[in-house]
Amino acid sequence: MTIAAQIKEVEREIGLRQNVYPALMRQGRMSQAKADEHLARMREVLETLKGIQYYDAITEGCVRLELRGMKQGRLQGLVKILTDTPRAHNDTLIITFARECAIDFCKAWLK
């Protein structure tokens, strides 16, 4: 499933919960605090997915730049680092790489 599809599903789920929770609270089956907590968690999931979508777009742009010859060897170095690094640390490495590429792209574009 794509990130965009996941975002759409989480947005749908948030809307569903916003419609269902008031009835559950009126029935005494859920407290306002619990409803707020569950909605806050889903909103955080949504923000996380949107962040991933944003960095995916930046990374895709960086890969295209790499393939056109900017900073040759950097992409291959990232692939080696990612394959040699435990998965839990890969997100930070990808985000750092994407930021560096975005900065390089802006500098090249402004020239």
Image: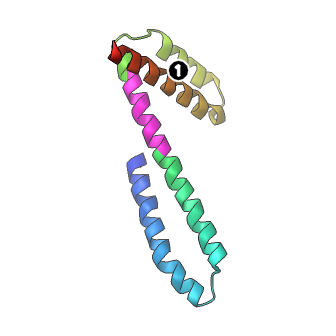
Q: Nearer the viewer, residue 74 or 31?
A: 31
Relative placement, left or right, of 5 versus 96 is left
Residue 91 sits in quarter: top right
Span shown in magenta: 51-63
Relative placement, left or right, of 26 versus 66 is right
Q: Nearer the viewer, residue 5 or 22?
A: 22
Q: Residue at x 53, y 48 (%)?
A: 48
- Give the residue at the far bottom of this rendering: 27
Q: Provide residue 12's location: percent of width, then percent of height.
A: 41, 65
Amino acid carrying mark 1 in the image: Val
Q: Secondary structure at mark 1?
A: helix
Q: Which residue is mark 1?
A: 79
Q: Residue at x 58, y 90 (%)?
A: 27
Vertical relation: 14 (above or below) 57:
below
Q: Residue at x 46, y 66 (%)?
A: 13
Vertical relation: 32 (above or below) 54:
below
Q: Is residue 58 magenta?
A: yes
**Magenta stretch: dominant SS?**
helix
Q: Provide residue 63's location: percent of width, then percent of height.
A: 40, 22
Relative placement, left or right, of 15 versus 78 is left
Q: Nearer the viewer, residue 44 or 4?
A: 44
Q: Is residue 48 magenta?
A: no
Mark 1 residue crowding within 10 angstroms, few (<14) / some (14–19) / many (20+): few
Vertical relation: 58 (above or below) 25:
above
Q: Provide residue 22's location: percent of width, then percent of height.
A: 52, 82
Q: Residue at x 65, y 36 (%)?
A: 88
Judge whether residue 3 can be spotted in this image: yes
